[in-house]
Amino acid sequence: MKKVLFIILAGLLAVPFTSFAQIKIKPAFGINFSSIKNDDNKFAIDGQTGFSVGGTVQIGRKFVVEPGVFWQKDKYEIKDIDALPGEVIKGDYSSIKIPLYLGFYIIGDSKSTLGIKVFGGPSAKFNIGAGSDEIAGIKDIGKDDINNAIWGVKAGAGVDFMFLFADLGYNWGLNDVFKGDWFNDVKSQTNHFELTIGLKF
């Protein structure tokens, strides 16, 4: 709850500085290349390539505030399971991702034909569904095995050219993805390289 309030407060504090600024709508598609921090001997969890669809609203010209909403699909593999040698489980989970980024154009600005910016900020992903192969016919990994909220912090850089943009960033996971009896004491913080491309108008 404190992290939700932080995101809301950061957005509200930015409004007085940006209410009369340039506004851009940015529909986008993203690809994420994830790695899952896992230092437990019970499972070896590997992140796989996922994707997202959504968009942001960019407010400002030289300094910008950029809240957004995305539907995101993350994929993973679990292998070298301590209790089940040789077993490989493939799965995925879906979430609604809400980022709030602050950025600064080091070349040009949001209205320039060519602009280059750096940005960063927090994000929250809210679990809406999950599925996987069964673990040795015992169970699959469903929505209840994924944390309801997954928090992250992202930093990156982007290029705008006319009505197109491309952003590349790195997202650090702040809490575990998996929960429940199968994942007690298993660390599963997920980090992503994220490439996002789209339009702005």
Image (cartoon, grey):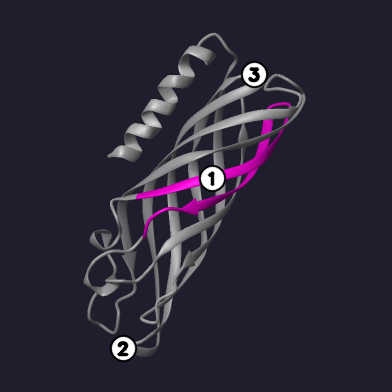
Residue 43 pos. (x, y %): 39, 78
Q: Amino acid at mark 1?
A: Lys
Task: Identify which residue, 30 or 108, lies in the foreground.
Answer: 108
Q: Amino acid at mark 3?
A: Arg
The image quadrant that residue 134 belongs to is: bottom left
Q: Amino acid at mark 2?
A: Ala
- Magenta: predominant secondary structure element? strand
Quadrant in which the C terminus appears? top right
Horizontally, residue 145 falls left or right of residue 51, namely left
Q: Would you place residue 82 above or below residue 172 in this image?
A: below
Residue 51 pos. (x, y %): 51, 52
- Image: magenta residue range: 150-176
Residue 154: image tag: 1
Q: Measure the alpha-carbon separation of dots 3 and 2.
A: 55 Å
The image quadrant that residue 142 belongs to is: bottom left
Q: Which residue is painted at 53% across and 14% down in the image?
A: 17
Horizontally, residue 160 falls left or right of residue 31, namely right
Q: Which residue is mark 2?
A: 83
Q: Measure the alpha-carbon separation of dots 3 and 1.
A: 21 Å
**Dot 3, how many residues are within 10 Å of its Cα: few (below 14), some (14-19), or many (20+)?**
many
From the image, state whether disc 1 or disc 2 is nearer to you: 1
Q: Is residue 201 visible?
A: no
Q: Which residue is mark 3?
A: 61
Q: Earlier in the sequence, mark 1 or mark 2?
A: 2
Residue 16 pos. (x, y %): 48, 12
Look at the numbered disc 3 and give the secondary structure of its residue.
loop
**Dot 2, how many residues are within 10 Å of its Cα: few (below 14), some (14-19), or many (20+)?**
few
